[in-house]
Image: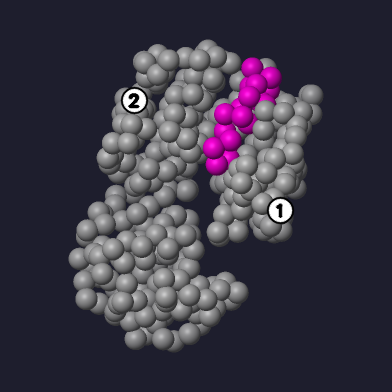
């Protein structure tokens, strides 16, 4: 396996080397400010959010993971008691409690009593859509703020950095490893409207209906949805679903059994894979080993998550360099916290 120093020296630009050093420090359990390398919009620090809320009463819009992160932060600052209610468009959540705060549907009028409404998603795409919805509901912008202005994930450009992935051909075949809800593939289609085919791998069967629904909205028909994980050989694996039911990861403690396949065994012999994206919760290196013949043969563009395990940024980079020595390597980081470092190879 290629050494960390040789990987560092082979990186294609200064920003990649900066991210490499931060990930190295993080792997050694040092305190690291990933906001310094964040690829996204200008953001504010959490202490500014705390000052903005102050003693105001507030409600939360969105009951997902961002809401739980936000409430955890506010709880640590003694501001949890200021929250009147949480609103979410998912009616199945109505009546449930998060941190002792009730969840209700968006249609309720109790939000008018709050001095401030906080949009809790930290992904740009979700918050941008929510902002439009709240405005259409007549909620004035001056009464709202975005958690993503303080704690953010740039899921719009993630995997498709315009300075790195500059060109797409007319016969692109995209592999979306860990496609979750198909939204990364939708972003791919925005960048490459003339794409030829998409392979969408997702082991969580509960997501298949969502994936198919989103495929239908795109109008793009040449999609092969594979309800399975990507691995280094064909097998059955234990799989643990997250608390939010949409995600999950391969784990010996998993309560479910899933199918897993190597990419080399799935793609058709005459298909030239041109772009592989992987975000598979720590199974990236295994998945890449199962795609080794495809990668060596076609040298596709790669966008690989390298933050799930402390040394992934070195181990995965070294493995890919051993397969294709000519690959240019770039790192980019898409959150203001420690998640979502992506390795690009081109």
Image: 54 above or below 255:
below
Q: Secondary structure at mark 1?
A: helix
Look at mark 1 in the image and give the residue it sits on. Answer: 205
**Label disc, if present, on residue 330 of the rendered structure:** none
Residue 40: x percent and y percent? 36, 46
Q: Residue at x 37, y 19 (%)?
A: 8
Q: Is residue 164 visible?
A: no
Where disc 2 sits, the SS reads helix
Give above or below for 79 relative to 227. Answer: below
Residue 282 covered by magenta stretch: yes
Taking the image as shown, residue 267 lies to the left or right of residue 279, namely right
Start-end of magenta stretch: 278-296
Residue at 61% across / 43% down in the picture?
Answer: 251
In screen coordinates, is 290 left or right of 159? right
The residue beneath circle 2 is: 17
Where residue 116 sits: x, y (%)? 31, 76
Mark found first going from the N terminus, 1 or 2:
2
Depth order, front residue of 253/34: 253
Residue 74 position (above or below residue 290): below
Residue 231 lies in what quarter of the image?
top right
Label count reads 2
Q: Is residue 123 above or below residue 313?
A: below
In percent of width and height, residue 37 lies at: 32, 38
């Amino acid at each position: 396996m290629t050494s960390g120093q040789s990987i560092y020296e082979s990186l294609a630009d200064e920003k990649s080397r900066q991210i490499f050093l931060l990930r190295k420090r993080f792997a050694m359990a040092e305190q690291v400010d990933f906001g310094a390398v964040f690829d996204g919009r200008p953001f504010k620090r959490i202490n500014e959010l705390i000052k903005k809320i102050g003693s105001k009463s507030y409600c939360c819009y969105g009951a997902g993971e961002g809401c739980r992160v936000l409430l955890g932060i506010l709880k640590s600052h003694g501001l949890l008691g200021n929250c009147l209610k949480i609103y979410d468009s998912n009616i199945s959540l109505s009546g449930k409690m998060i941190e002792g705060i009730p969840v209700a549907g968006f249609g309720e009028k109790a939000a008018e009593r709050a001095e401030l409404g906080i949009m809790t998603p930290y992904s740009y795409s979700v918050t941008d859509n929510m902002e439009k919805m709240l405005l259409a509901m007549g909620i004035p912008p001056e009464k709202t703020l975005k958690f993503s202005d303080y704690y953010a994930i740039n899921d719009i450009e993630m995997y498709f950095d315009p300075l790195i992935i500059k060109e797409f051909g007319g016969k692109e075949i995209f592999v979306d490893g860990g496609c979750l809800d198909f939204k990364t593939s939708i972003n791919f289609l925005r960048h490459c409207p003339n794409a030829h085919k998409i392979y969408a791998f997702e082991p969580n069967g509960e997501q298949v209906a969502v994936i198919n629904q989103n495929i239908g909205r795109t109008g793009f028909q040449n999609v092969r949805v594979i309800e399975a994980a990507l691995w280094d050989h064909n097998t059955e694996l234990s799989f643990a679903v997250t608390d939010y039911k949409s995600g999950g990861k391969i784990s010996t403690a998993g309560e479910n059994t899933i199918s897993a396949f190597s990419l080399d065994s799935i793609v058709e012999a005459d298909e030239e894979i041109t772009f592989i994206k992987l975000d598979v919760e720590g199974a990236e290196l295994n998945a890449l080993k199962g795609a080794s013949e495809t990668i060596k043969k076609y040298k596709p563009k790669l966008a690989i998550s390298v933050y799930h395990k402390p040394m992934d940024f070195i181990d995965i980079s070294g493995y890919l360099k051993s397969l294709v020595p000519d690959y240019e390597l770039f790192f980019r980081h898409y959150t203001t916290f420690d998640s979502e470092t992506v390795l690009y190879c081109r």
